[in-house]
Image: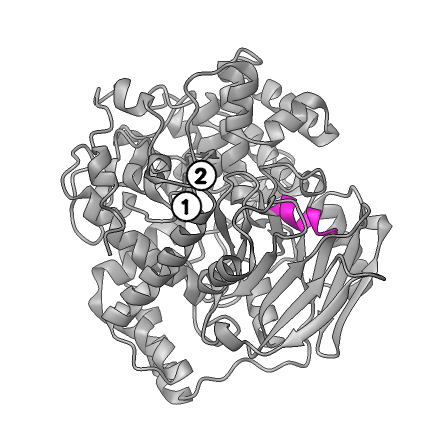
Amino acid sequence: MDKILRINMGAEGGPKLIEGPLGDYEGLGGRAMTSAVVLKEVPADCHPLGEENKFVIAPGMLSGTLGAQTGRISVGCKSPLTGGIKEANSGGQAAQVLARLGYAAIILEGKPADGSCYKIVINKDGVSISEDKSLAGLGNYAVVEKVKAEYGDKVATISIGPAGEMKMGAASVAFSDMEMRPTRHAGRGGVGAVMGAKGVKLIVLDDEGMPRRQAKDVEAFKDANKRFVAGLNSHPVTSQGLPAFGTNVLVNVVNEAGGFPTRNFKTGRFEGASKISGETMAEQTAARGGVVTRGCHKGCVIRCSGDYTGPDGKWLTKQPEYETVWAHGANCGIDDLDVIAQLDRIDDDLGLDTIEMGNAIAVAMDAGLAEFGDGQAALKLMDEVAKGTALGRIIGNGAGAVGKMFGVENVPVVKNQSLPAYDPRAVQGIGVTYATSTQGGDHTAGYAVATNLMKVGGDVDPLKPEGNVELSRNLQIATASIDASGMCLFIAFAIMDQPETFQALLDMINAHYGYSWTADDWAEFGMQILRNEREFNKAAGFTNLDDRLPKYFKKLPLAPHNITFQVTDAELDSVFNF
């Protein structure tokens, strides 16, 4: 990964390519790369859908190697949803393929003057760009089928659905998985709308004939990777819980803890939780002849993804993840897995963030547009989005837009981005992360649930403020580094509990790059990423007043614990005291 591909989509006479060295971005990958480029090259006051914004795709530092769990990819830009900096992260095959093609980043610049629909193809022979109007308006599944017919089934794809073309604030970017299905998404912040604004519908990546990336010390890298995998295979979460039931194993855990937001965050327990749990889904999948769990990219040893097989015994969608099951399930009062899976399939095809869409529909239900628990009504609302009607565009722009248009007072957003599947009143550490993350409401930015509820890496009481600021701070720092590495975030369970597994991760980086990083260097790397992101957000007009939860979380007690969010504003302002 020794070059950056820049494509000026608004150049006179059509898109223009420039390949260049890494320069100031040497040694960066993933989130570190995307955030550095956005800070340095994007005017903070630009319109997110305008020509000055840039769309950055970056594989992780270790992507394309033999390292386990290194298949994550980052997408960065100024967010049309939050108005701040955005890094959205995805699995799938693209990270490994793009890295082996030698690119540390693709940067889409400028903006075509008309409604162009471009296809970009990258292989060992170079890069080609062509206009392909036959792709316009297609869902992600139809796009991938056209790619398979033209390029075979050994390539990787990056695409947007109709939501991205319509520039909706909830639009995602789809990445193909190992079965070449567009099921992995950089979902958050409306990144698909920015790709759509650049006039790019599809990127095809073909690494045939390209070697894997080689470490500077091959034997040391192999040894470190072996120790790293051993750690993952010995931790109960990464070796038992996730491989057995996928991420949806959390439904019963979080529901029992009283932090499972139900019917637009009104209570912390859902009476239908057992019907949509990971255990129930696994049993149903097996009975219908599906694959209960599998990896989402080559080199995955955790295997928390899987298949969802419909009542007819046919594949319908990938196994809906915990966040999706919650968003379209408990949050909307829906306890039917088949309906949730249909909504998930539609989200993936249209190119939409399932978290944002689940919250948008829940707020719409709160506004009286449908009844909580009415799965068919939820499907009809999604049909409005697909058609691009006025109502559909409101819903497709997220929960904040729905709340404003229909007068709903209690809307669960931070920086206009919807909160995920843990109520901050019952899980105070994740509330700190929601409030202060540079990304808007985001659980992955600092997954305090691991320690608050699962007791990984220690034990911090989820119902009290004490210790949760420090917990969120440390996790936000570590997560920024993980997002840069190309590693799956779920490695955190093992590295938080096993010092030797964390050391193995450092040893992999050191062996690959010839570094001598220590734990302090890892932390400093994460802190610098966060400093970059906060610097951009400050220039974009964000203040400490934006690092807050909606006030109703401090006013309305949440059953069953009858507790409010207890962390003070002064404590929130101390999170980034480094």
Residue 203 drawn above or below residue 66: above
Which one is nearer the viewer's eye here, 78 or 384?
Answer: 78
Number of numbered labels in the structure image: 2
Callouts 1 and 2 close, C-beta under 8 Å: yes
The picture quadrant where one finds residue 161 is top right
- Kind of residue sitting beneath label 1: Thr
**Magenta stretch holds residue 197:** yes
The answer to whether residue 177 shows anywhere in this view is no
The picture quadrant where one finds residue 254 is top left
Q: Earlier in the sequence, mark 1 or mark 2?
A: 1
In the image, farthest residue toward the left = 466
* Residue underneath mark 1: 247
* Whole-percent x, y for residue 551 in the image: 32, 23
Which one is nearer the viewer's eye here, 457 or 163?
Answer: 163
Quarter of the image for the C terminus: give it: bottom left
Q: How many residues crowd mark 2 within 10 Å: few (<14), some (14–19), many (20+)?
A: many
**Magenta stretch holds residue 362:** no
CA distance for labels 1 and 2: 8 Å
* Residue underneath mark 2: 323
- Residue 255 falls left or right of residue 83: left
The answer to whether residue 83 shows anywhere in this view is yes
Q: Bounds of the magenta span? A: 192-199
Q: Residue at x 25, y 32 (%)?
A: 257
